[in-house]
Image: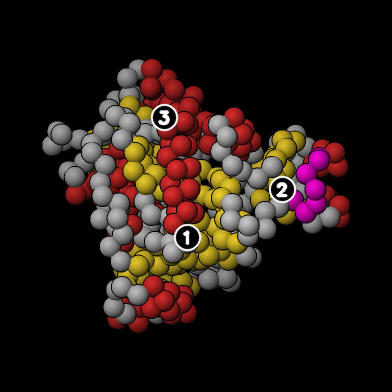
Amino acid sequence: MKGDLKLSILGGGQLGRMLIQEAINLNISCRVLDPDVDAPCKELVHEFKQGSLGDYDTVYQFGKNATHLTIEIEKVNVDALERLEKEGVKVYPPSRVIRLIQDKGTQKQFFKENDIPTAPFELINKKEDLTNTAIPLPYIQKLRKDGYDGKGVYKIHSEKDYEEAFEAPSLVEEWVDFKKEVAVMVARNESGQIKTFPLVEMDFNPHLNLVEFLISPSELPEGILKQADELAIKIAESLQMVGVLAVEMFLTKDGRLLVNELAPRPHNSGHHSIEGNYTSQYEQHLRAVYNLPLGDTQSLQHAVMVNILGEDGYEGLAIYEGLEQVLKLSGTYVHLYGKKFTKPFRKMGHVTILDEDRDSAIEKARKVQQLLKVKA
């Protein structure tokens, strides 16, 4: 391994920030392209460029002198990435994977073609098509493109909801009455070595459709853990993925696992790994990108990760109330994302709680939720 590796990153948000923090340990210098002049990554990189991630020329010019290029967000210009690959830049995840993930409809078709269990679905072009779908009510409508963090998802309970449905190419998906949402982070390097992180369980805020906290490792039955691992590995191999990949799944009440969505990058489902595992998802991503041996993913202790969101009704320069009380709790690790301004429900940071006892870790996590508030 060379001692002067360089990495170009499309996106300068919190995922890029945590990736850069890990890159420093491996003596990898980073450069970032992001549309926000105050992006969280700006002060941590050797070179920062402000510009659109969706503009062909901007992405191409940023990447043309790079050796290795990665992403922290999927909404990027894939045509520019394809050209860069042809010119010898190592783009990981590969542009074809990013293109597939950008379209939830194509993603679902990939599941179907590769015998990956997923909820039944249909593709539609406009909301008028909702009247002709064979998927029974209630069901979920998802925009094929540009949905993220719960946006672009609409539950249709009855025909009365048609009026508010999305007027855009979408997929209609059978409503899954699931027991739990779970996820596996899997990594694959260029040589084909694959490693999974232990399955995590997620608790969602039902009103925001955002993860409130996750628990690692899962204590679900061994058969479920094995099946989830096998699914994640099968997907990574089918995609010929390079880098880390989040595989989000539903565990149904009758014990089946259904793959919901993929994210070909570090993900909220793996934040806890910074302290909770021998190797973090960010280090693993770097190892994969540079075709290094993948690290040990075992859990060190029970870990619970709490998302810190901007409080409803507050917008402006961020103020962190209760931070001192949280820092007094043993086994708590605070990560603030460097965002100057808060707004309702914006992701401003996370806290990971480690404990030898799972219930104790969960109890501390709930305390952190009560204590730490982001206001303005």
Extreme-front residue of the structure: 223
In the rendered image, the vertical position of residue 16 relative to residue 31, given as above or below: below
**Which residue, given by chain and number where applicable, does mark 2 sit on?**
174
SS type, badge 1: loop
**Which residue, given by chain and number where applicable, does mark 3 sit on?**
240
Which residues are drawn in magenta? 133-139
**Could you tell me how far apart the alpha carbons at marks 2 and 1 are, in whole angstroms?**
26 Å
**Viewer-nearest residue: 344 or 277:** 277
- The answer to whether residue 276 is magenta is no
Give the image location of residue 120, x and y in percent: 69, 42
Rendered residue at 64%/39% (across/down): 144
* Residue 190's disc number: none
The picture quadrant where one finds residue 312 is bottom right
- Name the amino acid type tagged 3: Gln
Q: Is residue 94 visible?
A: yes
- Name the amino acid type tagged 1: Pro
Left or right of residue 324, residue 232 in this image: right
Give the image location of residue 2, x and y in percent: 14, 33
**Which residue, given by chain and number where applicable, does mark 1 sit on?**
221
Sequence order check: which comes first, mark 3 or mark 1? 1
